[in-house]
Amino acid sequence: MLGQRPADAYRAYRSRSSGTRQTPPPRKRRGRVAEVAIIGLMVLAGLFVVVVGFWAVTLDGGREAEPEVQPTPTLGERPEYWLRVLVQNEAGEPFAAALVEFRDRLDQVVATQLTDQDGRAEALVTVGSGYSVAVRIPGYEVARLPDLVVAQQDTPRHTVTVQRAQGAASAAPPAATAAPAAGSEAAAPAPTSSAGGSQVAGGAQTAPSVSTPTPALAETAAAAPTTVSAPAPQLIVAHPNSRFTTIDPASNLALHTSESLGWQHFPLLAQAQRPGRVWIGPRGSNQAIALDLAEMRVAGEITLGENVIITALVEPPAGQRLWVGGVQADEGSQYSGRVFEVSTAADSFGEVLRQMEVPLTVSTMLARADGEMLYLLHRRTGRVMFFQPQEGLTTLEVAVTDYAPPQQPTNPTQQTVSRFISSAFMLALDQRELFLVNPTQERILAISAETGEPTRVFEVGPGVAAIRVHPDGKHLYVANRTLGMIQLVDLETAQVADFIPVGQAPRALAFSADGTRAYVANQGSDTVSVIDVAERRVSDTIALEYTPVNLIYAP
């Protein structure tokens, strides 16, 4: 045929001539076999599905269906139940208006509540273990109940017994009182939450404010400061916006935060010999005030000349006067050091009795226990002046060996750090040594308080913000801003004996009157760490509304 290949034409010819049927090509034969195999497999699969389905239906009909398995709840879906407590005093009577903190296993506050008239409080928390409860009442020790378990069933109400703190028997708690008699009204303001941790009782809105006195009040205060009864011990915390917070050291409860005084300077704090008072002076201004702790008001105000800058405040043990260290500028803008003796007597309050010039400007000032010697530090040069205030004479001027002045700041951080050294100047408890921080060589220097000769060196590393001698006279507590820790220096061996982690950027230190607790103002975390001195650990953390930059314990 036309169009056929010769080979195909030949095979067709042979087929016709032989009378046999043509065999399909091998490729077509394999394709047909595959199609048959696929169809067979599909039929078998269908039969298998029918048989298995029939078997499953028959088997399930002859037995009970298994219960439905509930999915495991996620963290946000875990069940919750009530954690209930009952607060009572030592006599077993219910305590109303007590602040109860409910804490989780990480010691984070998950809820707070004031107890009702029956001393009861409760919080809805996630079912689990490791909960704890802390009860805070002004004038009472913090009562804690650890290792509480919350189950998804009725659980008994946990009883917490509170005990009045030593020395606070006459202190009337302003934020919580014992349960009132029937028909009477409870006078306890609800606490407002602070940044975290402890609560602020009363809040800034209900707390009495510290305000600059009116002219009439100023004249009255200057003539005769009001007599007040001695309050319970308090911890006073200063903030950079010239606000002050009072903290009850027994319960670690922030009681009141004052209104701003309008100052823009670093707040100086100094002990007052009169109970219930502290001295406050904005560093860099020409004013100092006596703060009444009972009423949180200005009890008296001292104003020096317009060209005077206050840098230090010290009240000697004898009282009736206040030593004010500072700087005075003359007409040619030349600065010279000054020490002012100011009367604090009722009939001459605020009167400048004497004004004494000293060789160098005063950065900070310490007083010997007997009040007969003042130690004046000029921070820029590391020179210490021994000054006898009674005679108005500088008896000794010492250039501290191995002291390097701080470098000129090149950025705001360095400028801030350089100002911390004002609080790093301390007198030993035995009055024999002076400790001062070398701001550039990362060490604390000790010199004799009699001769000014160097005695020893403490290597503590960079970042020292404040130093304080413990009341037992055996340890020097160092607030290290860089490490976020308190370094305990053994004064006998001159070695760092221990480290205590606190908050971020610790700035200032203070001790309780009995030395069992240390308080650390953490500028970077807006908290105050409470250190158990015996156990060398942080036992509590007090959260504040504003940044703390200084603090003082007022016994």
Image (cartoon, rainbow, N blue to C red):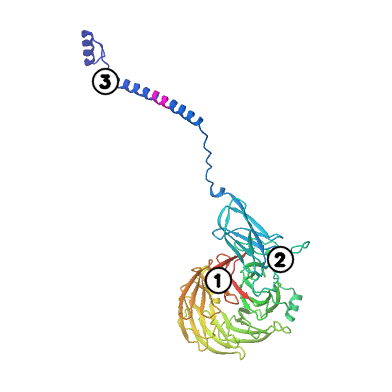
Q: Position of residue 179 (x, y in %)?
A: 72, 64
For marks 2 and 3 on the same chain, the one whose residue lies earlier in the sequence: 3
Please state which amino acid type lies under the numbered disc 1: Asp
* Residue 532: image tag: 1
Outermost residue, bottom direction? 391
The Cα–Cα distance between marks 3 and 1, rounded to whole angstroms, is 97 Å
Q: Position of residue 212 (x, y in %)?
A: 70, 72
Q: Indicate whether 131 appears above or below 38.
A: below
The one of 58 and 140 positioned closer to us in this rendering:
58
Look at the numbered disc 2 and give the secondary structure of its residue: loop
Look at the numbered disc 3 and give the secondary structure of its residue: helix
Q: Write down the residue under mark 2.
A: 178
On-image quarter of the C terminus: bottom right
Q: Quadrant of residue 425?
A: bottom right
Q: Write down the residue under mark 3.
A: 26
Please state which amino acid type lies under the numbered disc 3: Pro
Report crowding for label 2: few under 14, some 14 to 19, many 20 or more residues within 10 A (C-alpha). Answer: some
Of the two numbered discs 3 and 1 in the rendering, the one whose residue sits closer to the viewer:
1
The one of 255 and 416 positioned closer to us in this rendering:
255
The Cα–Cα distance between marks 2 and 3, rounded to whole angstroms, is 107 Å
Per the image, is 195 magenta?
no
Q: Quadrant of residue 118?
A: bottom right
Of the two numbered discs 2 and 3 in the rendering, the one whose residue sits closer to the viewer:
2
Chain part drawn in magenta: 43-48
For marks 1 and 2 on the same chain, the one whose residue lies earlier in the sequence: 2
The Cα–Cα distance between marks 1 and 2, rounded to whole angstroms, is 28 Å
Kindly identify the residue that appears in the image at 51 percent across and 84 percent down: 433
